[in-house]
Image (cartoon, rainbow, N blue to C red):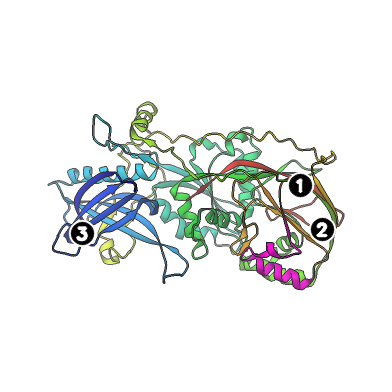
Amino acid sequence: MITMQCILRDTFYLYPKAKDEYEVSLYDKCLVYEPCDHSRARNRTEVRLDDVIGCHVMKVAEHVTSLKSTSSFFCVYAYHLTEKRKGTSQFREKKTYVFEVDKEGTYEDNLVISRKWQSALLWLLRGFRLQKTPDCPIVIPKELPAQRHYLVIVNPKSGPGKSLEIFLNRVRPILAEADISHLLLVTERQNHARDFIRHLNLTQWSGVLVISGDGLLFEVYNGLMERPDWKQAVKIPIGIIPGGSGNGLARSISHACGEPYVADPILASTLGIVKGRVAPLDLMKIETPKHGPLYSFLTVGWGLMSDIDIESERLRAIGEIRFTLWAFWRVFSLRIYNGRISYLPVTQRKAASTPQRLTLTRSYTAAKDCLTNGGMETNGKRRKSASSPEPTSLSSTSEFDEATAIDLEVVTDNHVGRAAKEPALPEVPDSADSFPALTDPVPSDWTVEEGKFVMIYSSLQSHLGTHLFFAPEARPDDGILWLLIIDANVTRFQLLNYFKQQEDGNHLSLPYVRMVPVRAFRLESYTDCFMTVDGELVRTPVLQARVLSALGRVLTF
């Protein structure tokens, strides 16, 4: 049994239950509180730090006379896994815990105590271990961790056209709870994000947050790879929040983490982003005869599914259901495609990786060196910007109602020291594999199939959408392209069954469906038809794709 280490312990009032005093203990994995009155039932509440996203210090609002003005408060934001009934699917539910600090005679002295608890909580959330040393007890840094700054890119016309509304009403409040500042870019044209990212100074950003469908993320990754410093640029952590018709990567990230997604995709994706862990992501390099290389994070397709991708664009206003509706139409108006597929099969799979935090797990003795050597921002004070989280009143939770929530306001951190910028994750060495040029014959260890097909489709990720479980064995960084092949001798009824079975990942048991794990492939079309990359139309009769293992970075739980 692993013994938890107690970091801090004290007694506070639980707001708004001002008459009841609670013993509050902060451990390295959880926050625990229970009533001090032993005559009462010992209702012990444990808050897992894995569910916590942030902590704010608060004070009594100026217009409030019912609370002591000398009290300080610290507020903990958590999103707990729960279920409506036993055995039903889980979802995340917000709960806010507010503790009143009334230990000293002045507000300033109580504020010092609140800041100490805030600092300890935030350092633990960033992955630091606050440990005792032989010479002294646990040291709680006076400085708060470096504030994260995200560039947020929104396509207001993506899918149903609600991406900007999603950001303003759903995402921005959670960023504020997690103490994340941001700059918002609303795209105005095709390739706006691609051009912006290509010339952006990335050193000032902790990550890039994309709120759209898969098309905008395609622009971002291609903009990063077109930079002169692409080897460093592509390592910037990317967060994706579903706002379009196709949301394959967002769904795949949640699936890989075991996070509930379907109940609330926006919340699931946003919480993964604010937790700040970083995981490697495979990308795909696509070569064509007439154009420069393209870079994909999701799919390359030809045949039936590519036709559905492109032709259903006229229905994009209705969201993801457009793919289902157009699939029915295209199956009953079935086309056959002539071509050749050549591929390099996978012979050995690599072990799964574990998502890491932006900061490396280490003791505060190492962190203190970083603070001393790296200095603090703007003469020890955090710079204020228009995008920094503004003071807000608390939202309603089961711990307090709306009437009492307006009694408190957030105390800004402008005069609190901040640690130096967090270190990046270690580099992943480039693959030493060699691949043929597009104009060269494929090597002898490649498999070649030529004939008539209904579709050939490849994906780096497990899901193509919320209910499209394309490659059940796929992981975001497994180094594999999952190549699905359906020959032309399939019936319409079998295709309808394929789409039905794909919702739960059962399509691979169908005898007319083949899924081949490959490192690279070359696709040659003898038919005038669509080819797609991440759902975007590519006009070419031939392309070659290969996996770039663990080249990118994504934010995840």
Give the residue at the far front of this rendering.
1
From the viewer's perspective, is 409 left or right of 161? left
Q: Nearer the viewer, residue 546 or 209?
A: 546
Q: Is 24 drawn above or below residue 287 in the view shown?
A: below
Q: Residue at x 35, y 39 (%)?
A: 129
Q: Which one is earlier in the sequence, the residue at label 1 or at label 3?
A: 3
Question: Mark 3 falls on what kind of element?
Answer: loop
Residue named by callout 1: 521
What amino acid type should be assigned to the residue bearing mark 2? Cys
Instruction: Tell me the number on the disc at residue 64.
Output: 3
Question: Mark 1 falls on what kind of element?
Answer: strand
What amino acid type should be assigned to the residue bearing mark 3? Val
Residue named by callout 2: 529
From the viewer's perspective, is 141 left or right of 347? left
Q: Is residue 357 magenta?
A: no
Q: Is residue 167 visible?
A: yes
Q: CA distance from mark 1 to mark 2?
A: 19 Å
Q: Residue at x 71, y 65 (%)?
A: 510
Q: Quadrant of residue 536?
A: bottom right
Q: Quadrant of residue 473?
A: bottom right
Contact between marks 1 and 3 (CB within 8 A): the answer is: no
Q: Is residue 387 visible?
A: no
Q: Judge the density around disc 1: few (<14), some (14-19), many (≥20) Cα neighbours within 10 Å.
A: many
Residue 35 placement (x, y as % from top left) = 19, 59
Contact between marks 3 and 2 (CB within 8 A): the answer is: no
Q: CA distance from mark 3 to mark 2?
A: 68 Å
Q: Which residues are magenta?
A: 491-515
Question: Mark 2 falls on what kind of element?
Answer: loop
From the viewer's perspective, is 157 left or right of 415? right
